[in-house]
Image (cartoon, grey):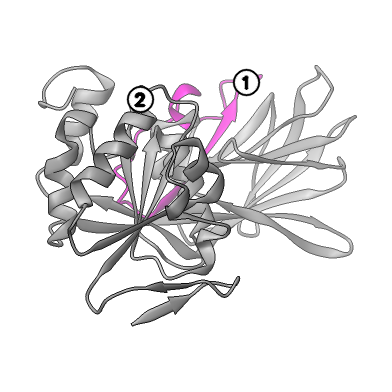
Amino acid sequence: MARQNIFGTVFGVEAGMMQIAVFPNISKRRSGEIVDRIFKFYRNKNVRLVMPATEARQFRKEEYGLPCVERVHIDMALSIGGDGTLIGVCRRFREQGIPVCGINLGTLGFLTDIEPRELESRLGKILVGEYIVENRLLLSGFASNELGEKFLGNAINDVVISKGGSARMLRMEIYVNNTHLTDCQADGLIVSSPTGSTAYCLSAGGPILNPTIRALIIIPICPHTFQMRPLVVSEDDEVRIKIRAMSDLVVTLDGQESFKLPPSDEVIVRKSKMTAQIVKFADKNYYDVLKAKLWGTGGDWH
């Protein structure tokens, strides 16, 4: 069977052959080593590897480079870096529903499930299908005004509302569905998914949620009053924030994509119809990983 990309180049893909896209973070010192190990392991196996053209040139794999990886058939994507790298790859493939497996070259790596020392054994499990694909909740962010709603984008971890150029706190009216929940003065507000509960949400004093819990977390950033506490609501709830500010607002998705909004706009966060698909392995229990990564105890994959 042959699959064709948008530029007309035909790549022969044999029946039953797995096609894997490799996305290395070029800023990580060990990325080149990991790329070479992946290509060495899958050599002469029923796998075709491809890479974005820019990264392929960087790592001397030009013959595997494609101008637009998203436009060809991919069975799985491998991200090489930290959680941020994995999130970026998930965002690239969110509409195609491609599972993404993370190889950890970051610090904590809650989402990445492969450590460098176990790379080949995990690549072997991928080859024979011994892995789990978890469907993680995605958030959708919108800006709303008298002209209607404007879709900003999706987030795996969080949608963050923060100040633009002003040092003044934001005065916010927070609504859940149609109920006015509270007024709050703070430096900003985080609406987090359970996946994002170990990211910015945790730094801001929020709770840790098992990613299988179907919920949203609302947490203020440096609130002026202790009355506003982190709140966990249903995944089906809509969170709406009215802002009273003297300057523009900044809405950031996963710390990777930012939008400047006028202070008259409202921000709406709700569950996306899509999910992020993240590859995990059955022998890594979530709570063991949490214990090893967060508190530095237990587990054998430090």
Q: Nearer the viewer, residue 284 or 201?
A: 284
Position of 112 with respect to 161 (left or right) is left
Single out the residue that lies furthest toward the bottom.
Answer: 1
Q: Residues within 10 Å of mark 1 (few under 14, many from 20)?
A: few
Disc 2 residue type (three-letter): Arg
Q: Nearer the viewer, residue 271 or 260?
A: 260
Position of 239 with respect to 3 (left or right) is right
Q: Residue at x 11, y 22 (%)?
A: 298
Q: Which residue is mark 1?
A: 225
Q: Nearer the viewer, residue 68 or 163?
A: 68
Question: Relative to 148, is 131 above or below?
Answer: above
Q: Which residue is mark 2?
A: 30
Disc 1 residue type (three-letter): Thr
Q: Which residues are magenta?
A: 201-229
Position of 234 with respect to 9 (left or right) is left
Q: How far apart are the two marked residues, 2 and 1, measured between alpha carbons?
A: 45 Å
